Amino acid sequence: MKLRWWHIALVICLAVAFLSPLASGSPDGLEKVAEDKGFMERAKEAPFQAIADYVVPGIENEAAATIVAGIIGTLLLFGLTYGGAWLLVLRRKGSA
Amino acid sequence: MHIPDGFVNIATAATTYTVSAAGVGYAIREAERKLGERHVPLMGVMAAFIFAAQMLNFPVIGGTSGHLIGAALAAIMLGPWAGVLIMACVLVVQCLVFQDGGLLSLGANIFNMGLIASFVGYYVYRGVGLLAGGDRRGTLVSGFAAAWASVLVASTACALELAVSGTSPLRVALPAMAGFHVLIGIGEGLITTAVLSLVLAARRDLLELEKV
């Protein structure tokens, strides 16, 4: 299989996912405003939990759990978006 | 900027869901009209990159962090409607798989970080580009401006939703959100220009794809 630019780009994305445990743990802008201005407690938990907070349940090491979550999400998004775009191209070709 | 459930009321949730659904629907039609084979891997890579990069919160000021939105970058490279689709994919997966952003507030999140951020990013890029020129420096300046503006306007939309929902009055939420996002936007600008810089150096042709 010929090496394409997006093979390399995808590897870079996965490398970025590997860096995720290094991310700042501080609340983001919206969360900080919510805390400061006193409406944070209005936030409701999701009705179900899958890979909540980007931590894969069942992996003891939190950094590893985060990295695995990042890899799952990165591959999932690549696949879904590539696949969806490809379907749209097919549909157009089909109706051409 | 992912709004959790409970921050927006039913009326705001319903309205933003309706607008976002219409926006995404239109984006799909535009994409079907214009997407070519060459767009396909770039769409995938953009979504993957935005997801991964969004995980890397960076500190901004006193106990606050920011993260990339990525809509401006997507819109610059692929066009605003493609940007809407990419952001919608990212936000839906983040909501359903990672519980980042509420299910009821998903409409608002797609509206802010999908529709608003994409279109502001795209048109600021085009507008500043007219002044700054299409050379490397002009592209990076336009990209930075587009990225920064997209974050600021998206955060303003978010503050409006909070106000309309009765969660926080506008005179409180707006300056607070704007204050942080003026800074977070700088991070968005830096990341966006870094990526654009890499693309210009390695695969300039990708920037010349027809915009959707």
Image: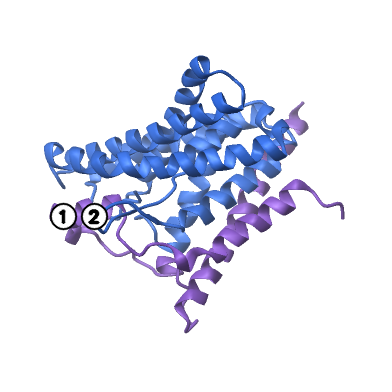
User: Do dots 1 and 2 share one subunit?
Assistant: yes
Q: Which chain is purple?
A: A
Which chain, by letter, is blue? B
Marks 1 and 2 sit apart, C-alpha to C-alpha, by 6 Å
Q: In x, y percent, where is residue B104?
A: 33, 51
Instruction: Name the mark on residue A32.
Output: 2
* Whole-percent x, y for residue A25 in the image: 35, 65
Kindly identify the residue that appears in the image at 40 percent across and 70 percent down.
A49
Q: In which quarter of the image is residue A62?
A: bottom left
State the residue at coordinates (33%, 33%): B153
- In the picture of the structure, the residue carrying the numbered disc 1 is A36
Q: Which residue is drawn at 74% across and 38% down?
A: A90
Foreground pick, B11 / B55 = B55
Q: Which colour scheme is used?
A: by chain
Q: How crowded is mark 2: few (under 14 residues within 10 Å), some or many (20 or more)?
A: some
Q: How far across and how far down the image is residue B170, in percent?
A: 15, 37
Image quarter of the C terminus of chain A: top right
Residue B124 drawn at (x, y percent): 45, 24
Residue at coordinates 60% horizontally, 38% vertically from top-left? B197
